Image: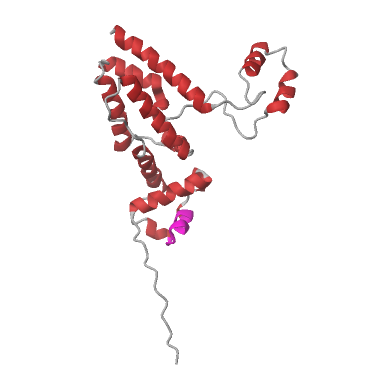
Amino acid sequence: MATRTRPVARRRVPLRKERVLRAAMSLADKGGIDALSMRKLAQELGVEPMSLYNHVRDKEDILDGIVDVVISEIEVPTSGHDWKTSVRETIMAARTVLLRHPWAPRVLESRKNPSLATLQYFEAVMAILRRSGFSVAMTHHALHVLGSRILGFTQELFKDSDQMASGPEAVAMFAQIADKIPYGIEMAMAVSHDGGLGGCDDDVEFAFALDLILDGLERLRAAE
């Protein structure tokens, strides 16, 4: 007579705050921050929604938490580079992290008070400047000039999107008003993308502006 084998019970992974936050980030990475809700998060984790409240207070607490996780992913260089190289590497590392989490700028901007993790990240940037001869006042100016760029993002003048007209379609559209914006057309055609009008390379423009700012700060530091 054949013996029946009992199905092996699957071991449930304990629910901890870190796991909750990682799952929240995964949802946001896949569907944007608007896709994140307590109900969907519970489904992602395979638990009842009420069990989440043993680890987080509410959605705002989750948003605070995932901001801290994002900040913790930024690698601040510890090698003995000159200050410009160190700051540049730090900011470009921040940009790499935020490109992995495109929802993060919106959430960062929505936080009313910076967390300890965010303050410690800014502290690391300030330490690079102060130890390189920047005065307190000049360090303060530098933070304001760099602005959100320190965190790897900026508010673009014109936000490119998939719906934006490009290529021949854009050329035809702007040809109708070329006589009214001659310098704009001249620049758009000179700085072309794929042979015509189209979206800008945000990474190139981000790095260009960052280098411009750092060069200016270096001149001011040397003049102090």
Left or right of 214 in this view: 32: right
Q: Which residue lies furthest to the top in this view?
A: 223
Q: Identify the residue at horizontal 65%, vertical 30% (top origin).
A: 164
Quadrant in which residue 11 is drawn? bottom left
State which quarter of the image contains the N terminus: bottom left
Location of residue 157 in the rendering, given as x and y in whole percent from the top left corner: 54, 23
Magenta segment: does it hold 90? no
Query: Would you say residue 56 is visible in this rendering?
Result: no
Q: Residue furthest bottom?
A: 1
Magenta segment: does it hold 47? yes
- Residue 63 vs 50, above or below: the answer is above
Quadrant in which residue 63 is drawn? top left
Near-viewer residue (204 or 104)? 204
**Magenta span of residues:** 39-48
Applied colour scheme: secondary structure
Specify the principal SS of the magenta part: helix
Location of residue 217 in the rendering, given as x and y in whole percent from the top left corner: 36, 14
Q: Identify the residue at horizontal 42%, vertical 82% (top origin).
A: 5
- Total number of numbered labels? 0
- Residue 120 vs 144, above or below: the answer is below
Left or right of 190 in this view: 51: left
Q: Identify the residue at horizontal 50%, vertical 27% (top origin).
A: 203
State which quarter of the image contains the C terminus: top left
Near-viewer residue (106 or 70)? 70
- Residue 93 vs 55, above or below: the answer is above
Quadrant in which residue 158 is drawn? top right
Location of residue 69 in the rendering, given as x and y in whole percent from the top left corner: 36, 42
Query: Would you say residue 203 is visible in this rendering?
Result: yes
- Residue 221 vs 109, above or below: the answer is above
Location of residue 110 in the rendering, given as x and y in whole percent from the top left corner: 43, 36
